[in-house]
Amino acid sequence: MSEVQNFKVTIDNITIEVPAGTSILNAARMIGGEVTPPAMCYYSKLKESGGKCRTCLVEVSKGSEKDPRPMPKLVASCRTNVMDGMEVKNITSEKVVDARKGIVEMLLINHPLDCPVCDQAGECHLQDLSYEHGTEGTRYDFERRTFEKEDIGPYISLHMTRCILCYRCVFTADELTNKREHGVLERGDHSSISTLLNKSLDNEFIGNIIDVCPVGALTDKTFRFKNRVWFTKPVDVHRDCPTCSGKARAWMRGDEVYRVTARKDQWGEVEEWICNDCRFHKKETTDWVIEGPSKIDRRSVISQGHYVDTKTTQILINNVIGKEPRLLMDIHDVSDVNKPEVELSRIPGPAHSDDFKTTRD
Amino acid sequence: MQKLTNRSVQVDRSPMTMGEKMYLPAIAKGLGITLSHIFKKKATVNYPEEKRPFSPVFRGLHILNRDEEGREKCTACGLCALACPAEAITMEAAERKPGEEHLYREEKYAAKYEINMLRCIFCGYCEEACPKDAVYLTETLMPASYQRKEFIYKKEDLLIPHPKKTETK
C-alpha cells in the first residue's frame, strides 16, 4: 500500500523510472554519464544543500503528462522534483549550455585563479567545470575581491578568495557537530566564511569540511604545499578507529603517507565521514591497513603515471654478464630532492626554507 | 623489376677503348673536378670565430626566470614535471616565510628544483606547460662533461642571475 509511486522522466532523450520526490539531478545521476548536470553546491549527503550555485540548471521542455507546458525558465535540477512524464533537456539544449557558460564566468569573476599555488588543483570541481563548460578568457577588468586572511586552526587553512559560497561546509558542520562554530558573515560581495572571532575549529569531525569544499577554499594544512595531488598515489586504507568508520583514502608517495582524506564516490562526494584523528594524525604506513589502489577515473590527472595490471619484464642482462650491472650513478646520491633527512610527510605544517637547511650545508 | 628511382644506371661491361686504356684523360678529368671545387662555396664554417645561426625554434639549456625585481617566478606547481615525457624534472615546494617576499614572488615556491639533463630530451613541453613563465629553454647548448653527476642541474644552476645585483656590480 505504502509503495512509492514511480514517475517516468526523460532526460536528454533517455527515459528512466524514478520514485516520486526524486530531484531531476538525482534522476540524471541514476542514468549517469554526460546526462548528469554538474553540481557545485548540491551534496546528496547534506540536507538543505543545493540551489546556490546554479550550475545544475536544466531546461524542462515538458512539465508533466497532465500539464505538458514547458517551464518558462531554466530550473535548478537539484531543487526541482520530477513529475510524471517530464521531459528534461540538459546538454541537448542550447540554452542550458549557454547559461552554464555564463554561470562559470560568474563563479570565476572573483576567483583568484591561483591554481599553480592551490593544493586543490587536480581534484578541484571548479577546475573541471570551467574546463568543460567555461570560456577561455575573462571579461572582468576590475580588482578581484580580497579578504583579510583568517586563521581557523592548526589543521585547516581557509582561503576566502577562492570560496564560491556553496555553503557545503556550513551544512557539514550543522550535520556532524553539535555546535557549529563557523558560518557565512556579511552580505553580497562581502560575505565570507568566518568564525567571527578568529576561533579555531576543533570539533572531532570538522576535518570533513575539507573534503566537502568543491574548490580550494578549505584545504588540509598538514598537506599544504607538500606535493601536488597528481604526484601522490591514492590508496584505499582502513584502521580500527574508535570514533569513525576508519575507512579512508591515503595519498602516498613511496611509503610515505602525505595526506588522508575520506573516500569519494564517482560524483566526488564523501562515502563515509572520517574523524580528525584519522585525517591529521595518522601519517604513518603502520597506522593503516592497505586495501589496494583507489579507483580513479582514467580521465583524471590523478591517474597519470599510475598503471594497473603491469607486468615486470625479466631483466636479462644479469644472466648474460653473470652479475648485477654496476650503476654508473645513483640519482639519490646526487639529487637534493627527496632526501632521507627531510621527511615532508612528518612535518606538521607546510615546509619552510629552514626545513631544508640540513641538506644544504 | 620496377625501379625505385630514375637514378640507377646500368653497369657498362663493354671492353675499354684505346682512350680509356691510357688513363691520362680520366686523371685529368678527375683533377678538373677537384680544381673546380676551389671556386665553389664552402660547406664548412670556421667554427669558433664564425657561428651558424640557430633555428628560431631551437631548444637548448633550461633557465629559471626571475621577475623585474629579481624574485623567483617558479611556484612549484608541478606542471612541467607532469608534462615532461622523460620524467626529468623533480621539485619540492615550500611556503614563503614573512621576510622572504623579496626572494619569491608567490607564497609558495620551489625549495628544490632539479632537471636531470641525462633524461631531458629538450622537447620544450615544460616551457609550454609553465603557467608562470618561469621555465624557458634557451639558445645555449648543454655543455659536455666527464661525469654523470654534473648533468643533474639544481635550482642554483638553472636560475638566471639577479637583475639588480648584476647592475650594481
Image: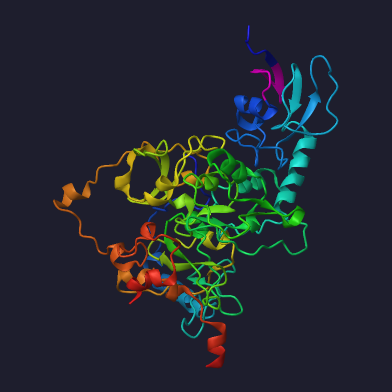
Locate residue B105: give its quadrant: bottom right
**A340 in relation to B69, above or below:** above
- Residue A247 at x, y percent in the picture: 41, 37
On the image, which quarter does residue B151 sit in?
A: bottom left
Residue B142 versus residue A288 in the image, above or below: below
In magenta stretch: residue A16: yes
- Where residue A22 sits in the image (x, y, percent)? 67, 23
Residue drawn at the location 55% of the way across and 92% of the way down: B168
Q: Which residues are magenta?
A: A8-22
Q: Residue at x 54, y 68 (%)?
A: B136
Q: Nearer the viewer, residue B145 or B96?
A: B96
**Is B81 located above or below residue A93 in the figure?**
below
**Between residues A45 and A37, which one lies in front from this camera angle?**
A45
**Residue A331 image point, x, y percent:** 31, 63
Q: Confirm whether the magenta stretch covers residue A150.
A: no
Q: Is residue A254 visible?
A: no
Classified by dominant secondary structure, the portion drawn in magenta counts as strand
Q: Is residue A198 visible?
A: yes
Q: Residue furthest top?
A: A1
